[in-house]
Image (cartoon, rainbow, N blue to C red):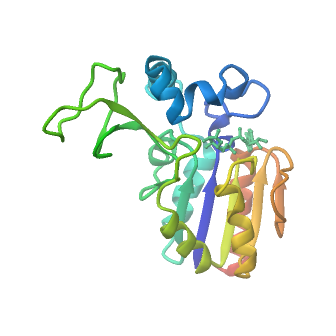
Amino acid sequence: MNIVVLTGAGISAESGIRTFRDSGGLWENERIEDVATPEAFSANPNRVYDFYNTRRQQLFDPQLQPNKAHVALAEFARLSSVNMTLVTQNVDNLHERGGSDNVVHMHGELLSAKCVKSHETVRWNGDLTALNTCQCCQLAQPMRPDIVWFGEMPLYMERIYQAIETASLFCAIGTSGSVYPAAGFVDIARQCDVETTLINLDETDNGHFDNRYLGKASECVPRWIESVKAKYELD
Ligand code: APR
């Protein structure tokens, strides 16, 4: 069974990573225009480097662990009867640490840096600053966070659309449905007669879902998985 799962910041909230638009979210302290656009990076690169360095450093905090929702999705994907495409808007590595592989990071990753000229990426664990330069160009170029900023095209879109069009189930987990194109995936799923499910703490204002689990991901994701396994006799 082909299943597409889209996750957002809400799936990592119980692990201790701040969301964006909840109370206490990241966009309460920083303006998107100041830290998450190409213009911000051109105008004040150090502020942008610092914003992502702080978020990258958090990934190495021993307190930060994947939660039951990450682990349950990884185990579900390993069932022989399930072909899961896990698409995430998140730039943390908690899906991978929870056991998922081939995670589709449509908004990029904190643990990666990109040459501003060639766009080649390299894995990156430490702080990234204006002093870091690429290894890929004749004349070394600055490196930027490998993050899709507002105004830039998300990654792997063709692969995502194909996965949705050939899916039986689409499930959005922990995302407010505020940012397109991800917020529009549910509409594409519905146009393709794909059964849609929302798992989120709060109601969202994007699109109609066939099924809704309003609550914490760590509780609702395992419940949703069990209901799917029972309904479609997956093992
Ligand atoms: N369990 C389930 N859902 C939760 C939980 C939880 N424990 N905690 C919060 N949520 C829900 C909130 O109700 C909210 O609707 O997660 C959602 C998080 O929404 P946002 O903060 O808007 O995060 P997200 O949807 O991932 O943002 C999308 O916007 O700023 C950009 O690039 C950034 O990838 C991000 C994109």
Judging depth in this view, the residue of 4 and 30 nearest the camera is 30
Residue that appears at 69% across and 48% down: 179
Residue that appears at 75% across and 46% down: 176
Above or below 169: residue 115: above
Above or below 201: residue 13: above
Left/right placement of residue 205 relative to residue 41 reads right
Judging depth in this view, the residue of 35 and 215 nearest the camera is 35
Please tell me in which quarter of the rendered image ligand 1 is found: top right
Q: In which quarter of the view is residue 229 placed? A: bottom right
How many dots with numbers?
A: 0
Residue that appears at 62% across and 39% down: 12
Q: In which quarter of the view is residue 195 placed? A: bottom right
Q: Confirm whether residue 235 shows in the render.
A: no
Q: Quadrant of the N terminus?
A: bottom right
Judging depth in this view, the residue of 1 and 30 nearest the camera is 30
Q: Quadrant of the C terminus?
A: bottom right
Left/right placement of residue 122 relative to residue 226 reads left
Q: Position of residue 194 (x, y in %)?
A: 71, 78
Q: Position of residue 110 (x, y in %)?
A: 44, 35
Q: Position of residue 108 (x, y in %)?
A: 47, 45
Left/right placement of residue 20 relative to residue 110 reads right
Q: Confirm whether residue 88 shows in the render.
A: yes
Q: Position of residue 10 (x, y in %)?
A: 69, 42
